[in-house]
Image: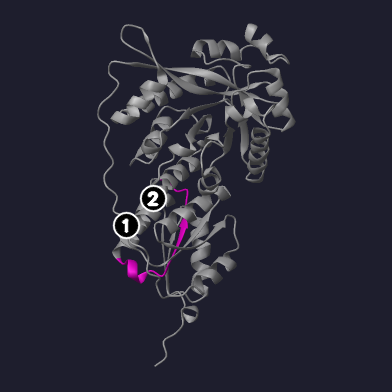
Amino acid sequence: MTTPTPSSAKAKSCLIVDDDPVFVAVLEQTLTDRGVEEVASAGDGQTGMAALAGRPSQIDVVVLDLNMPDSDGMGFLTSAAQLGYRGKIYLVSGEHSSILESAVRLARIHGLDCRQALAKPLDFDRLADLIVDTAGEQTPASPADNRAERHTITRAFVDLKVEAYYQPRVDVGTLAIVGAEMLARITSPDGGHVDTQRAIGHAERTGRIGELTWQMIANAIAGAHLIHGRGSQDLKLSFNVNGDLLASPGFADKLIDLVRRAGVDPRMFILEMTETGIPPDEAMALEALGRLRMNGFALALDDFGTGSSNIERLQMFPFTELKIDKEFIANAGRDAFSRECVTASVRLANELALRTVAEGVETEHDLEFIRSFHIDEAQGYLFGRPMRLSDFLELLGRPAQSDPQARLAG
């Protein structure tokens, strides 16, 4: 008796997990016409996982959408890995290609056999050909990692007040304010100022960084309400997120829920992460960042050029912008290495369709330099020091001028 080769085997069963009923109906009919014996469907990740969990060894192929209500495709991939699913997975989505690529990487990190990611709208016949010709034999997958429960942050900065200061971000071409980076300023009960970097470092060492970050997020939501009320809906607010908090269970879902319940558009927010701040657990980070991107949040890689694996990080995660470190901007006029780092950063960002932001722009010379590189946005003392929200709102009311200092002077 001859054992069939994997290429000769045909898929007999397929589970379609997608919330688009038209897409599901057309694909079901196409697969049935091609001889697939069983085609099942689910309208969200949770229902799909329930269907898969009942008999994972009997479903040859899963066709998975990423952006679905209640439980999305990112969560489905993680659950499928925990279940030990060994069939084939095809991703289909209308999301940006960087999100699709991140989902494929997430699946493969989990040990899942993710064959391909296809952008919607797609050719149903092509997808059906891929599914039907998929080998029915199952590829052993690496077991899902047994991850220890992350430390639950229960203690808060009860004795400290966290206030958000806003540093303007401007369009390099027009000098119009397009957003602000939110920076934490901390005061003690007696009104004295606390060194922010030391406080953040202490918070990270003692497991309190989560509480500080959630206070900043609350400030961001409140600030977004006031900025929106001034008719500045297109402005974006960015704030830093610690890598460990980012990868903690439920962080992305909690942030999405808070913003939605507050009635604020997630597209107003940019989450900034440094290269060294992204957690080593790539699967957890990919799931969280992919889910945030699908819900409208933008993602920035901060201090680009200061880490050892920035290019790998840019390829791995679905960032939307790249922030060039202020040291390169400050030294580019007199240091060839810094200048080449800026050149390479901008070229790479352009190839990846990422917006570029120059940090630490302090002089007119710095401004002319970044203009020569066609950098999109800038922030720094030339356009404004970090300021209270009331001062930032007042600044928004002033017209853009060719001289940034004239605008600051009112």
Above or below, 74 against 236 in this view is: below
Q: Is residue 410 visible?
A: no
Which residue occupies 51% across, 39% down? 307
**What range is drawn magenta here?**
55-69
Instruction: Tell me the quarter of the picture where residue 47 sits.
Output: bottom left
Question: Which quadrant holds the C terminus?
Answer: top right
Above or below, 396 against 303 in this view is: above
Mark 1 vs mark 2: in front: 1
In the rendering, at what x and y percent does residue 184 appear? 43, 20
Instruction: Tell me the quarter of the picture where residue 52 sits.
Output: bottom left
Which residue occupies 50% across, 11% down? 390
Name the residue carrying label 2. Answer: 75
Amino acid tagged 1: Gln
Query: Is residue 38 or residue 163 the one in the foreground?
Result: 163
Q: Earlier in the sequence, mark 1 or mark 2?
A: 2
Amino acid tagged 2: Gly
Above or below, 190 against 160 in this view is: above
In the rendering, at what x and y percent does residue 363 appear? 67, 18
Q: Is residue 169 magenta?
A: no
- How packed is label 1: few (under 14 Cα within 10 Å), some, or many (20 or more)? some
> Helix or strand or loop: what does disc 2 sit on?
helix
Name the residue carrying label 1. Answer: 82
- How packed is label 2: few (under 14 Cα within 10 Å), some, or many (20 or more)? some
Query: Is residue 4 or residue 225 the one in the foreground?
Result: 4
Q: Is residue 348 visible?
A: yes
Instruction: Tell me the quarter of the picture where residue 176 sits.
Output: top right
Above or below, 180 against 20 in this view is: above
> Helix or strand or loop: what does disc 1 sit on?
helix
